[in-house]
Image (spheres, helix red, strand yellow):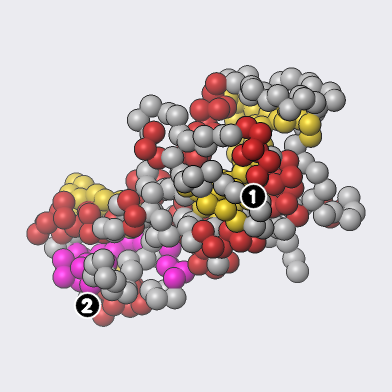
Amino acid sequence: MAAAIALAERGKGRTGSNPSVGCIIVKDGKVIGRGLTQPSGRPHAEAMALAQAGAEAAGATVYVSLEPCAHDSERGPSCADILVAAKPARIVAALTDPDPRTSGQGFARLKAAGIEVSHPVLADAARASLAGFICRIENNRPHVTLKLATSMDGCIAMADGSSRWITGDAARAHTHLERARCDAILVGAGTVAIDQPALDVRLPGLEDRSPRRVMLGSGEAPAGWEVIRSPQDIAQLDCNSVLVEGGATTASAFLEAGLVDRLLLYRAPILIGGGLHSLGDIGLNTLGAAHARWQLSDRRMLGKDTLEVYEAACLPA
């Protein structure tokens, strides 16, 4: 299952509103098929793996990072049906599909055909991998990651606005990897006007993974960009994940709206002093309200810079 989830990670940012799923088929201790969701969402992972396995799939064990879909579409049959036709002995799944068109029905169809079903397996890892898809289904919006690159004293630029470069090569390369794994990347209208950012992926071999470019604001966006007027309008993008890169006004607006699910904080070992701060008012009325909102999930060194990753905590109502 760990290998299936790792395989699914390769497709993130390329499957549109579909989940990026991984599937591995094993028989007699040997992998006979593997697949992941293809660009634009089809074929699904199970179809790719079954195509490799062929007739050998009969009697095999299928590991898949999400419940096989139970609904047909114009683009292909349901994965539950093609698995039934392939006659594996066992399906091992990480998670139940939150999509109401499938939720539990894929498992039921497989069991009705006499196929053993085991789930959940490595559910937490699969849930992290599928965070964007799950957020879109459960919250009707994409999963939002906010990226901030700051000095030790929380500045994102000098007082005159110059910011190239606060962090080093390794941190910037990591940012480009994050871009490649997201469906869309968003900045504010001010950043577009001043910096004219390309927002592309400039890692060797991943240049074709540049996400959709979105501007937050009321102005006219450059050709090829999309525009939303408020943070709440991200639901209109109909995708699984959005990376918010700046600037400070845009970052603050998403935080104030409670629409940030994950924080990427790149911190360089420098002090700027009277520079531009990374955030403005985010709507907190008391210091107590600032506590317990974020949980550290990862910390690592990227060259001389520090990356800290935080997940939004589930706060009581």
Residue nearer the viewer, 42 or 86: 42
Q: Residue at x 74, y 45 (%)?
A: 249
Q: Residue at x 45, y 34 (%)?
A: 201
Q: Specify few, some or many for label 1: CA neighbours under 10 Å numbering under 14, 14-19, or 20 or more.
A: some
| First-in-chain label (1 vs 2) | 2
Q: Residue at x 62, y 39 (%)?
A: 192
Residue 1 appears in the figure:
no
Residue at mark 2: 113
Q: Residue at x 79, y 34 (%)?
A: 277
User: Residue 306 placed where, x, y %?
Assistant: 64, 28
Residue at mark 1 to residue at mark 2: CA–CA distance: 56 Å
Q: Is residue 163 left or right of residue 115?
A: right
Chain part drawn in magenta: 79-99
**What kind of element bears circle 2?**
loop
Residue 115 found in image quarter: bottom left
Residue nearer the viewer, 18 or 30: 18
Q: Is residue 54 magenta?
A: no
Residue at mark 1: 219
